[in-house]
Amino acid sequence: EVMDSLHDDARQRFLGGMAEIQLDCDWTPTTRERYFQFLKAMKKQNPDKTISCTVRLHQFRDQEKTGIPPVDRGTLMCYNMASPKNPGVTDAIFDPKLVQGYLKNGDYPLPLEAGLPLFSWGVLFHENEFKGLASGLSAGAIQSNPLFEAGPNGLYRFTADTVFSEIYMRRGDLVRIDQASPDELAALVERLAQIKAVKNISFFDWNPSNIRTYHVDDLYKKFQAAR
């Protein structure tokens, strides 16, 4: 009983200090009704909390079909644009031309915070078959590693059989690096600043190395100056 009481007390203190609840769902025209009912129920059960949800780029572009979620605000996810498993994809995390196409409609009837990608991964392929992800692998790290050499179409090739990121890779297997460059994010920030609904920007993920690499302070200042 004492442990149950402590657990309940900790839970209440946690919930009491929480100002916002954010829901994440890649809803579609066929699932939106059920999801939107769920969002309304969350607001009814938590009238003192800000209720927000993620908004994917296709939901921003196709808002007439996908609908506008009944929340206080949204987080526009400007990353993860394709399946990393597809060997025909140039960059699954960030494709600047694709982003510009998604944003061409220009506005949204909810206040938005735009999330920008500060992360990277290496996508491993054997004979054009997806083998796995090497989280955190960047172009800079791979270019200075003798285990890799330049391959076709901007990919990198393994120079020896090895276990890499707990995956057995053979000599000649390929790695694609998915990541946005600082210049690409700077261009995106200027575009986002032109969208009235976008009130702020945020970054994923937030760690000291990525903050330095992507010059986050400069990106934020650029966004504020362009508004």
Image (cartoon, rainbow, N blue to C red):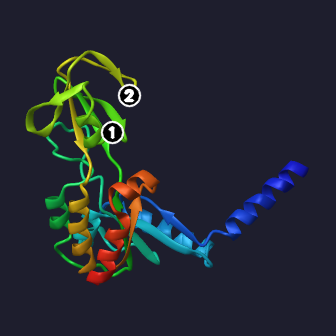
Q: Label 2, label 1: how many angstroms apart (C-alpha)? A: 10 Å
* Quadrant assignment, res 227: bottom left
**Relative depth, front residue between 31 and 156:** 156
Question: SS for tag 1?
Answer: loop
Q: Position of residue 207 (x, y in %)?
A: 46, 54
Q: Position of residue 100 (x, y in %)?
A: 16, 66
Query: Which of the two labelled residues, at mark 2 and mark 1, occupies the earlier sequence position?
Result: 1
Q: Amino acid at mark 2?
A: Ser
* Crowd rating for badge 1 (residues with CA inside 10 Å; few <14, some 14–19, many 20+): many
**Relative depth, front residue between 156 and 28:** 156
Residue at the far top in the pictured view? 161
Q: Position of residue 122 (x, y in %)?
A: 29, 37
Q: Amino acid at mark 1?
A: Leu
Q: Which residue is at a point 43% across and 63% down the rendered structure image?
A: 34
Q: Which residue is at a point 33% across and 39% down the rendered structure image?
A: 137
Q: Give yes or no for contact between labels 2 and 1 (Cβ–Cβ under 8 Å).
A: yes
* Crowd rating for badge 2 (residues with CA inside 10 Å; few <14, some 14–19, many 20+): some
Q: Which residue lies under the disc numbered 2?
A: 165
Residue 70 can be seen, yes or no:
no
Query: Looking at the image, is 132 positioned above or below residue 196?
Result: above
On screen, residue 217 versus residue 130, left or right, reads: right
Q: Which residue is at a point 43% across and 76% down the rendered structure image?
A: 73
On screen, residue 51 versus residue 76, left or right, reads: right
Q: Which mark is residue 137?
A: 1
Query: Looking at the image, is 62 positioned above or below residue 10?
Result: below
Q: Position of residue 97 (x, y in %)?
A: 13, 60
Q: Which residue is at a point 61% across and 78% down the rendered structure image?
A: 47
* Quadrant assignment, res 126: top left
